[in-house]
Image (cartoon, rainbow, N blue to C red):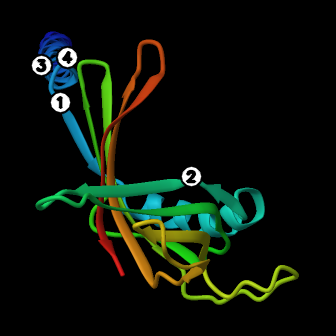
Amino acid sequence: MRTLSIVVLGLVCFLASVGGYETEYEDDVNRNTAMSANMNNYIDVVMIQVGPWMNTHLVPMALPDVVEGFEHRPILITYHGEIALTNGVFHTIHSVGRNGNAMMHYDRQLLRVSVGANIRQLGVSIGKDMFSGNFTYDYSAHIMDLGPTGFVDVDVATMTFTSEFIIDMTDFYIWMQDFRLTNMG
């Protein structure tokens, strides 16, 4: 009986060592392949906090000046015109939310994150400066040196964009791979 228990113990030890070796080998193989994950739940939680943070820390935000002109000479007279948008200010953000799937891909020490977002600017703000939109600009439009000046007050209901950025996990360097405005209206 003692011999039978020693044989059974030896057989169990042998089978346990074979199973452990196969599991360890499979883990090594899986570590070398690319991994992907859906980050929708995580991004949803983060996006809820982004809108209020942006309103507190980034708004109002100065916008760059834009000057566009043209010149055309059909026969003898040269026609020229110009529009200048200056002193632009971005005033409010109502909310920020995810658009589409947020995906993460990890391969060869590079983490690629693709995220789409909606910025909803539905709120109208009337403050001490008496503005009533999300963007305001002073403008000057001239054709042949004649034309009006004034201000532009713009409300944008939703701005949708997609972005993709890469994080190098060896030195934590982050760079923007792609950014596209897909809807503005």
Camera-side mark, 3 or 1:
1
Q: Earlier in the sequence, mark 3 or mark 2?
A: 3
* Lateral position of residue 165 relative to residue 1, left or right: right
Q: CA distance from mark 3 to mark 1?
A: 21 Å
Nearest to the eye among marks 3 and 4: give it.
4
- Mark 2 and mark 1: Cα distance apart in space: 41 Å
| Amino acid type, callout 4 | Asp
Residue 70, given in percent of the width and then of the height, sits at 30, 57
Tell me where residue 116 appears, x and y as whole percent. 34, 61
Mark 3 Cα shell of 10 Å, populated few (<14), some (14-19), many (≥20): few
Q: In the rendered structure, are the residues bearing label 1 and label 4 in contact, judged by CB atoms less than 8 Å apart?
A: no
Of the 4 image quadrants, the one containing the N terminus is: top left
Residue position for label 2: 64
Per the image, the residue denoted by label 1 is 34
| Residue at x 50% of width, y 76% of height | 147
Confirm or deny contact between disc 2 and disc 4 (CB under 8 A): no
As helix, strand or loop, the secondary structure at mark 1 comes to: loop
Residue at 41%, 20% in the rendered image: 169
Q: Quadrant of residue 161?
A: bottom left
Q: CA distance from mark 3 to mark 2?
A: 61 Å
Label 2 packing within 10 angstroms: few (<14), some (14-19), many (20+): few
**Left or right for 147, reference 51:** left
| Label of residue 125 in the image | none
Location of residue 27 with respect to 48 vertically, above or below: above
Residue at which label 4 appears: 28
From the viewer's perspective, is the residue at label 2 or at label 4 nearer?
Answer: 2
First in sequence: mark 1 vs mark 4: 4
For marks 3 and 4 on the same chain, the one whose residue lies earlier in the sequence: 3
Q: Give the CA distance from mark 3 to mark 4.
A: 10 Å
Residue 64, percent from left and from top: 56, 52
* Between 63 and 35, the one nearer to me in the picture: 63
